[in-house]
Amino acid sequence: MKGLIATLKQIWAVEELRKRILYTLLLILVYRIGSFIVLPGINAEALNSTSSQGGILSLINMFAGGAFSRASIMALGIMPYISASIVMQLLGMAVPTFQRLQREGESGRKKINQYTRILTIGICLFQAPSYMVAYVPQEAIISNTTMWWIQAVAVLTAGTMFVTWLGERITDRGIGNGISLIITIGIIAGLPGAFLQEVGTKITDGGFVLLLVELVLFLLVIVLTILLVQGTRRIPVHTAKRVIGRGSKQAMAGGQRSYIPLKINQAGVMPIIFAQALMFVPALVFTDTFLETTFSDVQGFWYNLVFFLMIVIFTYFYTAIMMNPVQMADELKRNGSFIPGVKPGKKTSDFIEGLISRLVFPGSIFLGIIAIMPAFAMIGGIDQGFAYFFGGTSLLIMVGVVLDTLQQIESHLLNRHYDGLIKGGRIKGRSSSSAVTMSQAL
């Protein structure tokens, strides 16, 4: 406890870090307040008395921080932006124009972000009417007119764009990945209520021993998830010695040993977010059809099979985007570095590519298994609300984002010669400062 208090004091003593944390908390507060503001023209009491949730609706509502069930101005949440990002990344792999933009650096990234926002608006204009037709009871609408529908669609679209703006501001001026952090906050908001409901149900039914078993398994899944997120394969790298300078100013440089950290789950939580965003589409758009029935049953075989396969595919896809073995080999050669026992150039790129492939396969399989565990938890008798945190998308996102946020906070502390948030200066599996420098260069 004393170590935790000392660390909090160190965090508060760093002015830049303090401002970033306070700024992040302020924007999160704005987001949570907005999730409780009901759409103009909707009777909140009628909405609460007539709405019921289950299956995929509970999952969508959890990702939106409860805004979905409340018909909030932020009911669509951040998922339209995630869907637009998926489309833009696919275009970046298939369309030469977007490939050139990706290679243009900062200017290209700004253009891609602008196109992503425009596409997000288009997706919102399509999803907003579908949401109101399928999930907002007609008796809850005070004045069901054409003008109201136009206003509601505009407000829902503006709400999503505002949430996107909040996420970008947190990324630029706050702590962590703002988009992922907003999703995490929405998930965490429902955890206390779901846990208390599970405790109350088990105590009422006399299942106290079963509740203890559930908690032990819950902690075990958390540990396994952390191992998945933090697991790293280190590639040793040597830098050849070379003489720099002339005459009396000559000096020896290089001769250092470092490593390139390759994570087992290099893609992080993004495959989960991408896959879940696409899983929402059939249930939101194709109402009263076979697709809605199939993709609304989170315990169903086909839902979980498709979800598992999409996570595996997106893990490979996102890793291929993030990791470029050829570029990594070129950077090593340019810096006078090499992997012991591997020739520079193509041999190095082939070695790195093969190693990445061997890491991605078990990582993607394990990621998919954890993602579908809530279905098995519900089949085992765990209440649906708490089962969503029993592994699955919720836990993976929470663990990944929390660890990423801790890492960013720790980086600020290490830059000012403070100890990290974990004993020993860094979380196990995290790269050392020299390795971080190497990975950033690559």
Image: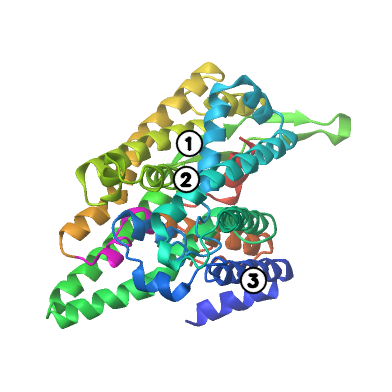
At x 45%, y 26%, the residue is 353
Query: Element under label 3?
Result: helix
The answer to whether 392 is drawn above or below residue 217 in the figure is above
**Mark carried by residue 428:** none
Amino acid found under the numbered disc labelled 2? Met
Q: Is there CB contact under 8 Å for labels 1 and 2?
A: yes
Q: Residue at x 67, y 68 (%)?
A: 23
Q: Say whether residue 243 is left or right of residue 77.
A: right
Label 2–label 3 contact, CB within 8 A = no
N-terminal of the pair, mark 1 or mark 2, is 2
Element type at mark 1: helix
Q: Which quarter shows the C terminus? A: top right
Q: Residue at x 35, y 55 (%)?
A: 225
Q: Position of residue 10 (x, y in %)?
A: 63, 74
390 inside magenta stretch: yes
The answer to whether 142 is drawn above or below residue 392 in the figure is below
Amino acid marked by disc 1: Tyr
Residue 305 percent coordinates (x, y)? 25, 40
Which of labels 3 and 1 is toward the front?
3
Query: Which image quadrant is residue 169 in?
Result: bottom right
Q: Does residue 269 sit above or below 67 in this rendering? A: above
Q: Earlier in the sequence, mark 3 or mark 1?
A: 3
Per the image, the residue denoted by label 1 is 318
Q: Real-space Cα distance between discs 3 and 1?
A: 31 Å
Magenta-colored span: 382-394
Tags 3 and 1 touching, CB below 8 Å: no
Q: Which residue is mark 3?
A: 26
Please give the residue where the numbered disc 2 appears in the rendered image.
270
